[in-house]
Amino acid sequence: MNKRYAMAIDLRRCVGCQTCTAACKSANATPPGVQWRRVLDLETGEFPDVRRTFMPVACMHCANPPCMHVCPTTATKQREDGLVTIDYDICIGCANCVMACPYDARSIEHLPHYAYGEPMKSETARFDAGRLGVATKCTFCKERIDQAAITGQIPGVDPEVTPACVNSCISGAMHFGDVNDANSNISRLLADTESFRMHEELGTDPSVYYIWDGGDQ
Amino acid sequence: MRAQREIVDRVPPRRQMDWDIRGALNFIFGGAGGGLLAATACAQPLGVDLRAPVALGLALVGAGLFSVWLKIGRPWRALWVFRRPSTSWMTREALLAPPIFLSGALAFFWQSAPALYVAGLLGLAFVYAQGRILKANIGIPAWRRWSCVALIVATGLTEGFGILCLAAPVWPSLLSLAYPLAALVAVRFLVWRYYRGDLRRTGAPDGTLRSLDEFEFRFVLIGHASAAVLAIAGAYASLPALVAAGAGLAVLAGALFKYTLVCRAAFTQGFALPRTPSRGRGAPGVGVQPGWRQGQGR
């Protein structure tokens, strides 16, 4: 059976610190205004029973990705390990995939943007003109995962081959691994807890699980 | 007490900003052009010289495609659009364009009736493909339904017959098309009512429902009631100017509808929290879907 990489996020542990957001921006050099990963802040209930929940969101790397089906150019593809990728050299920036994604995960930047107007040295060094005018999104840090095939390390266990956001999580809320391996960390975690997936009713079969109860917190 | 949640960082549905007026013009021009080719094919038995509407239909389809070309981020890669016919309706729409222009050119230069019928069928398929492009975009709740496809097709055909009827003052023999135009206006009204009910039944973003609510009165009164009355009265009294006025309203309403659908009512899915998590000794709680008006069931 092929691997299927997935993420599990324990909503009970997430403290909304946005470290994953910052780690993603650092790892992927996304411009201001583009967040491949972000943390939603939700208040629910009525006084005095009010709750605050933090929910990290990004591309869900769906098993049935609507973005891929609508992409007219084949720029959006799905790898055998479940990762949904974008080929920047083929994408025409039609934004059809942006409309198809129910997770608001994709962005298209038509012009360069810098934090302070003029580019800083670090921004100049990491600027990629190939990302202008095309769709971009979370990659699950695929370069790291690809490295695992060379080094023999395990994504989700060894930090070098694990997405930057998961590595950065200060509360241990984020987990990563192969859900088709019954013995992986993530499979055992999901078996032991209660979880949901966002907008499952749309038939996208997303690869991000949100844990809300069960197991040891 | 304030109920519900504090909104931070795009939690509720937001109006899509990636398809602006240029994206809408693809549907406005392309839909009208495809509908006009279909209507022109239907008018072939009237024995009128239909080269002008054929040319206009092709020009509209071309203008729609040009508009979308202006919108895409990498216009010089536009030909990559043909690469995924297996699942992408945008690819299929693009694939329909060359045979539309070929059959349309044959109909125009050689006045070939079979070519005109082919162009009409392909024009109708083009309009259908546009409806399916919207339906496949499941991130926009206002689009991802069959009733939206039906509305796009009904609107395209109405616009096509409407544009033909605009020529009634020049070619009085087109007056008889006022009756099918009025029938199509009625069909579009019924499909519109079904579409609105569909949204209410299944649930939709507040913003979508508000945008359509604001648009509905003008759309129904001007684009349907007035248009149908003028078209029928004009045909009955043999007053081509009246028919043209009704047709103009029906066409204008169709364009405004597509602008509203693409640029105003197109709100994203937003996010939902089906259950709030347990924390410490606190039990899990009920969830929330901000900015969303739940469906009323079927």
Image: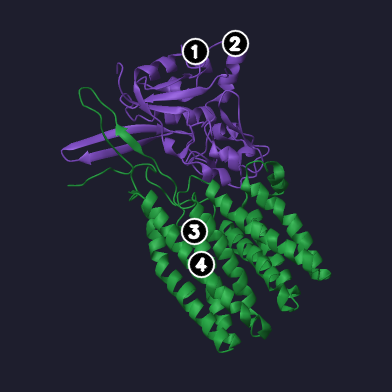
Judging by the rendered image, the residue that carries numbered circle 2 is A151
Closest to the observer: B26 or B196? Answer: B196
Disc 4 vs disc 1: Cβ atoms closer than 8 Å?
Answer: no
| Amino acid tagged 1 | Asp
B97 to the left or right of A184: right
Label 3 CA crowd tier, 10 Å (few <14, some 14–19, many 20+): many
Q: Chain of mark 4?
A: B
Disc 2 vs disc 1: Cβ atoms closer than 8 Å?
Answer: yes
| Amino acid tagged 3 | Leu
| A109 shown above or below B158 | above
Place residue B67 in its image quadrant: bottom right
Judging by the rendered image, the residue that carries numbered circle 1 is A158
Look at chain A in the picture and name its colour.
purple
Q: Comparing marks 4 and 1, which lies closer to the viewer?
A: 4
| Amino acid tagged 2 | Thr
A120 to the left or right of B49: left
Q: Position of residue B73 (x, y in %)?
A: 62, 48
The chain whose colour is green is: B
Judging by the rendered image, the residue that carries numbered circle 3 is B261
Give residue B187's mark.
4
Mark 3 and mark 2: span between their CA atoms?
51 Å
